[in-house]
Image (spheres, coloured by chain):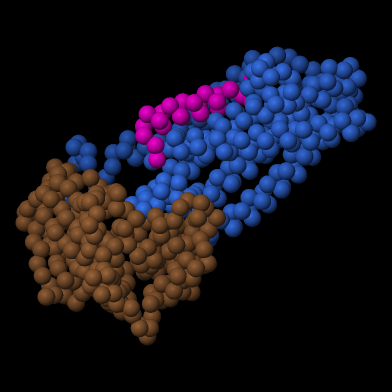
C-alpha cells in the first residue's frame, strides 16, 4: 500500500490515489487517438495538389475492360504462385517449430531465447519483397528465389507465433511426464503438442493465406509466380488491361482460399480443441 | 482388477526388493528450512503417510524424492534388488508420481492420459502413432476399476476435478511403478472412492512389494491405510518423526 495513503479504520475499503487508478491500456488508446489526429492534420496540409477526377478517368480508360486473352499463361503462373507459397509455408512450419522451442521462455534458457528472438526479429523486419530481391541476386530469376524469400519471411512470423503459443501452455505437464520416465521427445509429443496443435494449425493456415498473397508480389522482382507476368504486363504500353485481368485472377484465388482456409480452420479446431465444460 | 477376480499374490521371494534412502536431506525455501537432516530408510511393502499442516513441506519433500526439486542438502537414493544405488532421475521409469496439481494433458482424452503413464516403458517409435490395442484395453480396465469407464473418450477439459484426480491415479496404476509418490491423491474424492483408492495403493504395497509415499491430511485414512507415518514439524525442521501406524 502507498505510504502516503490516509490511515484507515479497520474494515474500510482503501481509496486509491488518482495515479494508481490510471490504466496503462486506456492511456495508450488516448495517446494513439491524439497521434492519429495530428498525423491526419499534417497529411492533409502537406498534400500535393492532384487532379483526382482526371486520374480516375485515366484509370478506367486504360485498365478496363480486362484482357483475358493470355489466360493459359495466367493460370500456369497462378499454379506456380500456389506451389511457391505451399513449399515455403511447409518448410517454414517445420523450421519454426524447432526455432520456436528455443524462443520460448518457459522451455529454453535465457541466452538461447534472446539469440533466437533476435534472429526472428531480423527475419521479420525485412519485407518479403526485399527477401525476394536478395534471393534473386543469389539464385537468379527463378521460383526457387521466391520459395527462399517466403520461407525466411514466414520464419519470423511463425517462429514468433509458435513461441507465444508454447509460452501460453503449462509446461509442468510435459515435465511431469519426464519425471515418470518419458523421453524429451515423448514429453513434447504427449505433454505439450496436444495443448498447442490447434493454435499451430491455425497460425500455419493463416501463414499459407498470407504467403499466397505474397507469392503474387515477389515475382515483381523476378522471384517467380504470377508477379512476373504482372511485371511483364505493366512494362508493355498496351498491357494495362492484362494487368487488370491478372489482378482479378489473384483476387479470385485469394477470396477462394480465404473461404477454404476458414472452413478448414473451423474443422481442425473442432477436431483438436474440445469445448470446455461451461460451453 | 475387479474385486471378484482372484488375485495372484506373489510370494515374498518373487517380490522386488526396493529401498528408499535419504541422507541428511534438507530443503530451505525463502530463508526458512522446511525439513532438515531427514534420514529415511524405507523398504518395499510399506505405505508411508506424510502428514503435517498445510505449508509444512509435504509436497516439497515429495518433489525432492521424485527429483523435480533439488534438495538444499543431503541425498535421495533408491535401490532395486542388488543393483547399485540410483538417484531419482535415473530411476524415473520405476517412479510413479500423482501430482497435487495432477499435470494431465488438457487437450487429450481421459484414456490417452492414462496411456501416457507408461511412456517410459515404450520407445518413441512405438508411441508415435498411438498405443497398441492391448495397452488401450488394459488402461480401460483400470478406468473401470476407478468407476470412470464412460469418460474414456471424453476430453480432459470436459471432466470434473474428482474425475481428473481419478484419471491421474489411473495413469499411475497403469504405469505400475515400483515406487509411488502421491501428493494428496484423494483430496477431491468422496469417502467411498478415497477409501477404495487408498486400499488399492495399500494392496499394491503389500502384495507387490512397492513403496507408497502419500501426503494425507485425514487422520482416519492414515490410521486405516498407512503402515508408517512421517510427520513434519513446522516449528522445528529437524523435529520430523517417523512412527509405526500398523504393526
Expressed as whole percent of the image width and height from the top left, the position of residue B74 reads 14, 46
Q: Is residue A13 left or right of residue A41?
A: left
Residue B99 percent coordinates (x, y) = 31, 58
In which image quadrant can residue B230 be found?
Answer: bottom left
- Residue positioned 53% across, 58% down in the render: B130
Q: Quadrant of residue B229?
A: bottom left
Q: Position of residue B170 (x, y in %)?
A: 38, 67
In the image, is residue A81 part of the stretch drawn in magenta? no
Q: Position of residue B232 (x, y in %)?
A: 12, 59
State whether residue B37 is above or below residue A220: below
Residue A167 is left or right of residue A197, and the answer is left
* Residue occupying image coordinates x 22% and y 51%: B84
* Position above or below: B171 against B74: below
In the displayed orientation, state which residue is furthest to the right.
Answer: A69
Q: Going by the image, does A149 lie left or right of A174?
A: right
Is residue A239 visible in the rendered image? The answer is yes
Query: Could you tell me which residue is drawn at 48 percent across and 74 percent down?
Result: B150
Identify which residue is drawn at 64% across, 36% down. Answer: A89
Which quadrant does the C terminus of chain B fall into? bottom left
Q: Between residues A125 and B42, which one lies in front from this camera angle? A: B42
Q: Is residue B165 visible?
A: no
Total numbered labels placed on residues in the image: 0
Residue A121 forms part of the magenta stretch = yes
Of the pair A199 and B179, the residue shown nearer to us: B179
The secondary structure that dominates the magenta segment is: helix
Q: Which residues are magenta?
A: A107-130
* Chain coloured brown: B
Q: Nearer the viewer, residue A62 or A5?
A: A62
Tell me: residue A141, above or below residue B189: above
Amino acid at each position: 500500500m502507498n505510504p502516503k495513503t490516509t490511515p484507515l479504520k479497520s474494515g474500510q475499503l482503501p481509496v486509491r490515489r488518482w495515479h494508481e487508478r490510471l490504466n496503462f491500456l486506456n492511456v495508450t488508446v488516448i495517446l494513439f487517438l491524439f497521434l492519429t489526429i495530428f498525423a491526419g492534420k499534417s497529411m492533409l496540409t502537406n498534400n500535393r495538389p492532384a487532379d483526382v477526377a482526371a486520374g480516375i478517368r485515366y484509370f478506367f480508360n486504360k485498365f478496363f475492360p480486362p484482357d483475358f486473352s493470355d489466360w493459359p499463361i495466367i493460370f500456369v503462373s497462378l499454379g506456380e504462385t500456389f506451389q511457391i507459397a505451399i513449399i515455403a509455408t511447409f518448410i517454414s512450419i517445420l523450421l519454426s517449430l524447432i526455432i520456436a522451442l528455443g524462443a520460448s521462455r518457459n522451455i529454453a534458457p535465457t541466452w538461447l531465447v534472446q539469440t533466437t528472438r533476435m534472429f526472428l526479429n531480423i527475419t521479420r523486419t525485412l519485407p518479403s519483397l526485399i527477401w525476394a530481391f536478395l534471393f534473386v541476386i543469389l539464385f537468379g530469376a527463378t521460383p526457387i528465389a521466391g520459395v527462399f524469400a517466403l520461407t525466411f519471411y514466414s520464419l519470423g512470423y511463425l517462429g514468433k507465433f509458435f513461441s507465444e503459443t508454447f509460452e501460453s501452455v503449462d509446461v509442468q505437464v510435459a515435465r511431469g511426464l519426464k519425471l515418470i520416465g518419458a523421453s524429451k521427445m515423448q514429453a513434447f509429443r504427449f505433454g505439450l503438442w496436444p495443448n498447442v496443435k490447434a493454435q499451430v494449425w491455425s497460425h500455419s493456415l493463416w501463414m499459407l493465406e498470407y504467403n499466397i498473397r505474397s507469392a503474387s508480389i515477389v515475382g515483381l522482382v523476378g522471384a517467380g509466380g504470377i508477379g512476373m507476368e504482372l511485371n511483364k504486363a505493366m512494362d508493355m504500353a498496351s498491357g494495362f488491361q492484362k494487368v487488370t485481368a491478372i489482378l482479378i485472377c489473384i483476387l479470385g484465388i485469394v477470396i477462394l482460399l480465404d473461404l477454404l482456409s476458414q472452413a478448414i480452420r473451423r474443422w481442425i479446431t473442432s477436431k483438436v480443441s474440445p469445448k470446455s465444460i461451461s460451453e | 482388477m475387479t474385486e471378484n477376480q482372484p488375485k495372484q499374490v506373489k510370494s515374498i521371494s518373487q517380490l522386488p526388493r526396493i529401498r528408499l534412502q535419504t541422507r541428511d536431506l534438507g530443503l530451505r525455501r525463502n530463508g526458512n528450512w522446511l525439513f532438515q537432516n531427514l534420514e529415511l530408510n524405507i523398504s518395499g511393502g510399506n505405505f508411508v503417510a506424510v502428514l503435517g499442516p498445510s505449508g509444512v513441506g509435504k509436497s516439497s519433500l515429495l518433489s525432492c524424492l521424485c527429483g523435480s526439486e533439488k534438495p538444499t542438502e543431503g541425498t535421495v537414493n533408491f535401490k532395486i534388488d542388488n543393483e547399485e544405488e540410483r538417484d531419482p532421475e535415473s530411476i524415473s521409469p520405476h517412479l510413479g508420481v500423482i501430482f497435487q496439481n495432477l499435470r494431465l494433458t488438457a487437450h487429450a482424452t481421459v484414456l490417452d492420459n492414462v496411456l501416457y503413464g507408461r511412456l517410459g516403458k515404450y520407445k518413441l517409435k512405438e508411441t508415435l502413432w498411438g498405443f497398441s490395442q492391448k495397452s488401450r484395453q488394459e488402461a480401460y480396465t483400470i478406468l473401470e476399476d476407478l468407476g470412470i469407464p464412460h469418460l474414456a473418450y471424453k476430453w480432459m477439459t470436459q471432466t470434473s476435478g474428482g474425475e481428473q484426480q481419478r484419471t491421474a491415479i489411473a495413469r499411475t496404476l497403469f504405469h505400475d511403478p515400483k515406487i509411488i509418490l502421491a501428493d494428496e491423491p484423494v483430496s477431491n474424492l468422496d469417502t467411498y472412492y478415497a477409501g477404495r483408492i487408498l486400499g488399492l495403493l495399500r494392496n499394491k504395497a503389500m502384495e507387490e512389494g512397492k513403496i507408497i509415499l502419500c501426503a494425507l491430511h485425514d487422520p482416519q485414512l492414515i490410521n486405516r491405510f498407512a503402515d508408517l507415518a512421517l510427520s513434519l514439524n513446522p516449528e522445528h525442521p529437524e523435529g520430523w518423526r517417523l512412527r509405526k501406524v500398523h504393526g
